[in-house]
Amino acid sequence: MMYSPEQLSDLEQIRTLKHRYFRCIDTANIAELGELFTPDVTIDYRGGHYRVSLSGRENLLEFLANSFHSDALAMHHGHMPEIRLTGADSASGTWYLEDVFISRTDRTRVSGSAIYTDRYLRCADGWRIAHSEYDRIIELVDRLSDDVTISSHYLRDVGRRPEQRSDMSRFISWNVSTR
């Protein structure tokens, strides 16, 4: 398929948008995250023992701020984007995720992969994520042994402290079958 220079620019802007998403959740950059989504964004994350379903940018930002907090460590890499322009101002994308999430509170580590499926809209101020969902491919949970030392922990300094966190139970269903 031949792309116009404008279409190539759109594809690169969408790739950059998703890369910003991964960086911002790992660094609890909630202000910048707010710039990445449409006001009516919808989310459906399906993991090994959880499902997160929500709508609206404010709900999503509250969920993310309470997930990537001062007692968490996180790393998300999005690979192999397959982006399709579906209209002049719309696109869809599929991404392969590789991630690690560590809870300092209970010293557990979740590592795995997932397939993201997104919808994007061009708004007055650029491309935004209108819908995002994923299904886990692999999800491994283990405990950090006592001899594991955490020597660098960015979220400890920038993430929400326990007294700043709010209840997220309205967004999460536990022990659900995703398939």
Image: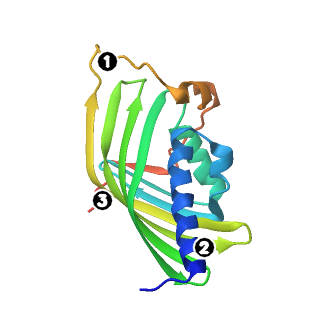
**Mark 3 neighbour class, 10 Å CA radius: few under 14, some 14 to 19, many 20 or more:** few
Q: Amino acid at mark 1?
A: Val
Residue 88 position, x and y percent, is: 60, 84
Q: Is residue 5 left or right of residue 141?
A: right
Cα–Cα gap, marks 2 and 1: 43 Å
Quadrant of residue 17 within the rendered picture: bottom right
Q: Residue at x 33, y 32 (%)?
A: 109
Residue 51 position, x and y percent, is: 40, 54
The residue that label 2 is drawn on is 121
Q: Amino acid at mark 3?
A: Thr
The numbered disc on residue 97 is: none
Q: Residue at x 61, y 49 (%)?
A: 61
Residue 12 position, x and y percent, is: 54, 66
Question: Along the polypeptide, which appears first: circle 2 or circle 1?
Answer: 2
Decide if residue 30 is in sight here.
Answer: yes
The residue that label 1 is drawn on is 148
Question: Along the polypeptide, which appears first: circle 1 or circle 3?
Answer: 1
